[in-house]
Amino acid sequence: MRTAWPIDSRPREKLQLLGAQSLSDTELLALLLRTGTAKAHVLDLASQILQQFGGLAGLLNASPAALRAVNGLGPAKQAELCAVAELAKRATAQSLQDRPTFTQPQAVKHYLQLHLAHLPNEHFAVLFLDSQHHLLAMETLFQGTLNHTSVYPREVLVRALHHGAGAVILAHNHPSGCAEPSPADVQLTKTLQDALRVVDVRVLDHMVVSQGAVYSMAEQGLL
């Protein structure tokens, strides 16, 4: 049976009265979906989808195949969600291209979460930056298992030279959910620092991404 939601819970009216920032994640998604199903009000459907994907970050990282498996999401809604996810990634990337990364650490973390947080296996990525620390490109260079990825410093160095980078931010995800780096992660960072220093490329940070957090080695004094 469909839930009868009170009028003050209607996302469109609430947005018009109080602004988009007043809406919950469920309400924002419901506004995008517009309609529910025969058995579920749009707010119930939005809540179920967010629970299924572990929140907005998981939904924005969901594959087309995962979206197709959701009851109540037709082709049009699937396409809209994919478009919103891509817009979010491009908007954050543009911000990092326009302004130095060190002035917006939260944007860097958000960008990495959009790309890495909900991947099922470990992925190692590099943000290549120019000498003023604007984003040139992000590349996922290595993929591994649930809890291990083999990283080859030579390949990181080759890609840094390819982009003409003056600095890099290293990043990898922990599918286990714990964002704290392992001793091996810290040692890898030092190895990459030494390798990239030879070609005058600075390692600004190494961020470990989980579904709920991003750990910055630079913020914790590990670089």
Image (cartoon, rainbow, N blue to C red):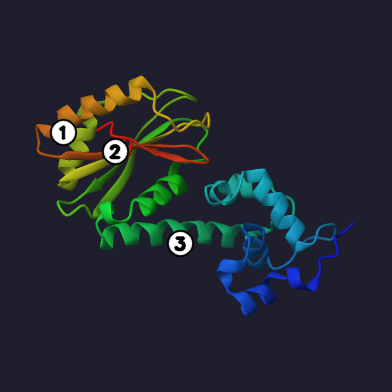
219 or 107, which lies in front?
219
**In this figure, which residue is indicated by the disc labeled 1?**
196
Decide which of tag 3 and tag 2 comes sooner along the chain: 3
Of badges 2 and 1, the one in the foreground is 2
**In this figure, which residue is indicated by the disc labeled 2?**
218
Mark sitting on residue 101: none
Mark sitting on residue 87: 3
Q: Residue at x 14, y 51 (%)?
A: 131
Mark 1 element type? helix
* Measured Cα–Cα span from mark 1 to mark 3: 32 Å
* Measured Cα–Cα span from mark 2 to mark 1: 17 Å
Q: Is residue 111 left or right of residue 64?
A: left
3 and 2 marks in contact (CB < 8 Å): no
Quarter of image, res 180: top left
The tally of labels here is 3
4 or 17, which lies in front?
17
